Image: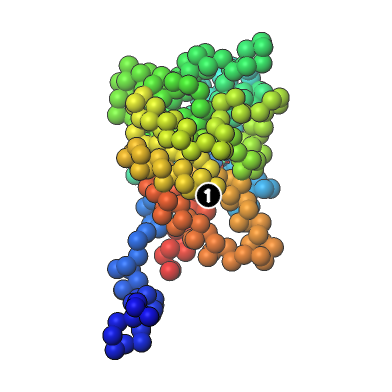
């Protein structure tokens, strides 16, 4: 009883809820904005003249040859999405991941073509070896079956430099090798690329939600798994430590990945590092909503906007999501 104001029946919460139905007030009291300018659209690029290959577990996402990637970039830019994140699938894979740092590699070619056609669209490139190694691991594998951290660092740094030279606006190392941010920073600086920012996949968990991506990139490890270099889903404090280390090594933006099962980690990394935080709403998170919506179990639009708002509310400044184009359209007509 003590909560009511004298002489009225309405409780403040009830009044606020009623007023919130009017758009202007709703906007005034809203704590979190989901804005198209916070989104990044991932893209898979392949060699070839005229390829558009659907990815079965990711309806609406395709592997695109360069010409189609440029068209897709135009569609992304026209919707007001500021950036794309490029993943390459090379024509051939080998144990040294040579396609990753080839000047004529698929990401390098796509970056040049997209930047030429759409100079204002930011191109961020994923820097990792797993799409390029014959065995699908994120680094060079020694005879004993373990990833060779230091040799891998050299190749990652070469890869990042070649992306920057192709015109990438930022590079995003996703491999989780120790010391990779520092190695990339040193190499970029030494080659006159000190302006190129690093978006570090700092807290990258060993997750079941990468399954569809591995189908898309054909990068499922041929043996073993990635638990040797990706994080235990049970650890949040460790994620904060990883983000701090990346920060000390020169990361400009830190990333938490996946997003939805790790909202608490996003919040902690944001609060405890004060860095700009990106969250990656990964392939499996996308696939879940798409599958449920296709089965008629969920309203896709409402579910996507709620999920992306939740990621922003948790503290992400940037949301990398395969829903980016749909969300951008829906946000225009909200
Ligand atoms: C590794 C990488 C992965 C993703 C982005 N970068 C997959 C992995 O570790 O197997 C996954 C992204 C997604 O699932 O959408 N280069």
**Residue at image point 50% right, 23% down:** 177
Q: In the figure, 330 relative to 137: above or below?
A: below
Q: Residue furthest bottom?
A: 7
Percent x, y of residue 65: 57, 39
Q: How many marks?
A: 1
Can you say which quadrant of the picture contains the C terminus? bottom left
Q: Residues within 10 Å of mark 1 (few under 14, many from 20)?
A: many
Percent x, y of residue 205: 55, 36
Q: Nearer the viewer, residue 47 or 122?
A: 122
Horizontal side of residue 122 vs 297, given as left or right: left
Query: Disc 1 marks which residue?
Result: 260
Rendering quadrant holding ligand 1: top right
Q: Is residue 304 visible?
A: yes
Horizontal side of residue 189 vs 142, given as left or right: left
Percent x, y of residue 251: 36, 30
**Residue at image point 66% right, 23% down:** 134
Q: How is the image coloured?
A: rainbow
Q: Give the SS element for disc 1.
A: helix
Q: In the figure, 286 relative to 119: above or below?
A: below
């Amino acid at each position: 009883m003590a909560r009511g104001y004298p002489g009225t029946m309405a409780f403040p919460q009830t009044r606020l809820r009623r007023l919130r139905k009017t758009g202007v007030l709703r906007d005034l009291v809203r704590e979190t904005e989901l804005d198209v300018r916070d989104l990044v659209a991932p893209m898979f690029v392949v060699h070839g003249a005229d390829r558009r290959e659907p990815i079965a577990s990711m309806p609406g996402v395709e592997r695109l040859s360069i010409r189609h990637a440029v068209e897709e970039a135009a569609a992304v830019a026209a919707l007001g999405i500021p950036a794309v994140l490029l993943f390459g699938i090379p024509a051939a894979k080998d144990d040294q991941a040579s396609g990753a740092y080839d000047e004529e590699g698929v990401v390098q070619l796509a970056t040049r073509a997209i930047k030429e056609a759409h100079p204002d669209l930011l191109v961020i490139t994923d820097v990792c070896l797993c799409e390029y190694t014959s065995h699908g691991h994120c680094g060079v594998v020694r005879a004993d079956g373990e990833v060779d951290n230091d040799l891998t660092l050299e190749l990652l740094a070469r890869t990042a430099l070649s992306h920057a030279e192709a015109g990438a606006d930022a590079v995003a190392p996703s491999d989780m090798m120790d010391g990779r941010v520092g190695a990339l920073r040193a190499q970029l600086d030494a080659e006159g690329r000190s302006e190129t920012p690093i978006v570090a996949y700092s807290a990258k968990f060993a997750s079941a939600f990468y399954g569809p991506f591995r189908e898309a990139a054909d990068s499922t490890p041929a043996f073993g798994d990635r638990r040797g270099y990706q994080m235990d889903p049970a650890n949040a404090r460790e994620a904060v430590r990883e983000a701090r280390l990346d920060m000390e090594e020169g990361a400009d933006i830190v990333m938490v990945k996946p997003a939805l099962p790790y909202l608490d980690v996003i919040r902690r990394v944001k609060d405890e590092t004060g860095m700009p935080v990106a969250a990656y709403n990964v392939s499996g998170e996308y696939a879940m909503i798409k599958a449920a919506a296709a089965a008629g179990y969920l309203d896709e639009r409402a579910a996507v906007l709620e999920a992306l708002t939740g990621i922003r509310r948790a503290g992400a400044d940037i949301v990398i999501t395969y829903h980016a184009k749909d969300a951008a359209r829906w946000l225009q007509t909200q």
